[in-house]
Image: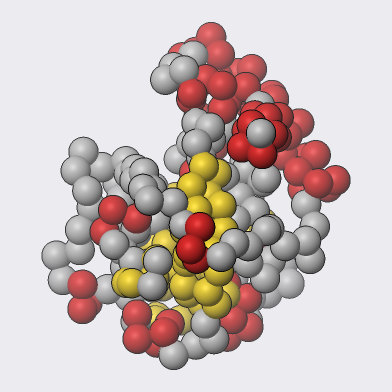
Amino acid sequence: MTDRRDFLKLVAGAGTASLAAACSWDGGDVLRPKLLAVSRVNDWVGENILFSPTRLARTYDPAERSPAFPSYFISPTMPFLKDPGAWRLRVDGMVRQPLLLSLGDLMRMPRVSYTVKHHCVEGWTALATWHGVPVSAIVERCQPLDLARYIRFASFDSDYFNGWDRTSALHPQTILAYGMNDHALPPAHGAPLRLYSPTKLGYKLTKYLVSMTFTDKRPGGYWEDQGYPWFGGI
């Protein structure tokens, strides 16, 4: 019963876009304008009424973790780095202190671990434990300008990207995850680094992360530009 209630909330939050995705049909040029209109309403409600910067998603005991956790990516085959040692996270844009961070740099920063429920826009959920650094710690170090209200998170998975509002990014459960279920983050789930938050739908959680760019203009997103809600909150 709990999962059913969760799914109904998910459908209500994601709107027409989630139903189209669950049916494996994007509606083409007929549905897309309607998706964009619905998305704008969902975004306003999510950002201005439903979202709380202090409300925490429920956490679970690690013993409750799901035995399987579906993986997904945009590239034809699973993305891999040719030289993992050369990977760096670039933090730039409207910041006072641009950063270039290795995985070691990130692991030496404050660490957060939690076991939470992941919500996919297609209707499935799964429990997993995530380990990483709070995005707030990155924000504190790079010192964004006051006008930089948005962040563009970019991936090496076929140039996948998402835009987030800075307030959501500063939520205490929004992290850059380098670990999953007490191990290093696996390639199927975004290695070496992914964005994670239990307060957002799965398509907002950019995997295979390579950059965070602070901007005063709201970025789009791979799915958002096709009609999915921009805010994508739960």
Q: Quadrant of the C terminus?
A: top right
Q: What residue sits 52% from the left and 42% below the top?
A: 125
Q: Residue furthest top?
A: 30
Q: Is residue 199 above or below residue 105?
A: above
Q: Residue 72: image x %, image y %?
A: 34, 43
Relative depth, front residue between 74 and 71: 71
Q: Quadrant of residue 193?
A: bottom left
Residue 147: % across, % down: 72, 66
Vertical position of residue 58 compared to residue 71: above or below = below
User: Residue 81, position in %: x, y?
Assistant: 20, 63
64 or 146: nearer the viewer:
64
On the question of residue 42 being in view, the answer is: yes
**Residue 51 placement, left or right of 221:** right
Q: Is residue 191 left or right of residue 228?
A: left
| Total numbered labels | 0
Q: How is the image coloured?
A: secondary structure
Q: Residue at position x 34%, y 82% from top?
A: 102
Q: Position of 87 compared to 117: left or right?
A: left
Q: Quadrant of residue 197?
A: bottom right
Q: Is residue 221 visible?
A: no
Which residue lies at the image location 45% right of the left edge and 40% below the top edge? 222
State which quarter of the image contains the N terminus: top right
In terms of depth relative to the viewer, which is nearer, 88 or 176? 176
Q: Residue at x 52, y 20 (%)?
A: 20
